[in-house]
Image: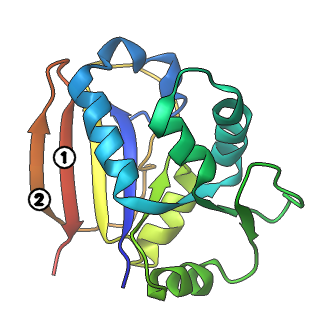
Amino acid sequence: MRKLVATEYLSLDGVFEEPGHWSFPYFSDDAGRFKYDELFAADALLLGRLTYEGFAAAWPTMQGTGEFGERMNGMAKYVVSSSLQDPAWTNSQVITGDVEAEVGALKDRPGMDILLAGSGQLFRHLMAANLIDEYRFMVHPIILGSGKKLFADGAERRPLQLAGTQVLTSGIVVLTYHPAP
């Protein structure tokens, strides 16, 4: 069975919205290596429509991305959406209907990790359905003061078990959690 790995860029105050606007100053060689290793341990991306549209607009035209960009553009992509009809990004497929059943079926297929990036609404839905096997939070050393939070007020209590930590040279701390038994 494949693992569904959720990976999120977060500020210290829990904001995950538009990390491209605030995370770049903290990108370092070891952060690049972490994201490279994470991507190459997966053979599929799972995205919500908004994150998908942002990625699909950027990755196919981005220059100088090497193997990482080739992997992003070539791997299977599953986008959960009730409104997207014809995804144009290579190897993209829309998931509609019973999201939990379809994601469960993806996990049951042979293969490598499935990487869920961004996609806050989808993240929260899959977390509530107990479908996320591993959480990776890249906590950046910045307080933004406002923006969409990954965990909204009133979120259901969910115990997690710390599986690992990694401190990157830029001050990013990667916290890896598994669902608590």
> Is the residue 49 above or below the residue 158 in the image?
above
Judge from the rendering whether residue 138 lies leftward or rightward of residue 90; answer left or right: left
Q: Name the one closer to the observer, 123 or 14.
A: 123
Instruction: Please tell me which residue is depicted at 25% across the width and 22% down the height of the picture.
Output: 29
Q: Quadrant of the N terminus?
A: bottom left
Q: How crowded is mark 2: few (under 14 residues within 10 Å), some or many (20 or more)?
A: few
Judge from the rendering whether residue 81 lies leftward or rightward of residue 7; answer left or right: right
Looking at marks 2 and 1 on the same chain, the residue that comes earlier in the sequence is marked by 2
Residue 165 image position (x, y, % from top left)? 10, 45
Task: Report how far apart the C-alphas of labels 2 and 1 lie in the structure.
Answer: 7 Å
> Is the residue 5 above or below the residue 2 in the image?
above
Judge from the rendering whether residue 134 lies leftward or rightward of residue 121; answer left or right: left
Q: Assign a secondary structure to mark 2.
A: strand
Residues at badges 2 and 1 in contact (C-beta under 8 Å)? yes
Q: In which quarter of the image is the C terminus?
A: bottom left
Q: Assign a secondary structure to mark 1.
A: strand
Residue 20 image position (x, y, % from top left)? 51, 23
> Is the residue 176 above or below the residue 131 in the image?
above
- Which of the 4 quarters of the picture holds residue 172? top left
Residue under label 1, please give it.
Answer: 175
Residue under label 2, please give it.
Answer: 162
- Which of the 4 quarters of the picture holds residue 149? top left
Q: Name the one closer to the observer, 98 or 61.
A: 61
Q: Which residue lies furthest to the top in this view?
A: 25
Residue 31 image position (x, y, % from top left)? 27, 29
Residue 95 visible here? yes
Q: Name the one closer to the observer, 50 or 35.
A: 35
Q: Which amino acid does label 2 sit on?
A: Leu
Instruction: Please tell me which residue is depicted at 20% across the width and 40% down the height of the picture.
Output: 174
Q: What residue type is labelled 1?
A: Leu
Judge from the rendering whether residue 140 lies leftward or rightward of residue 51; answer left or right: left
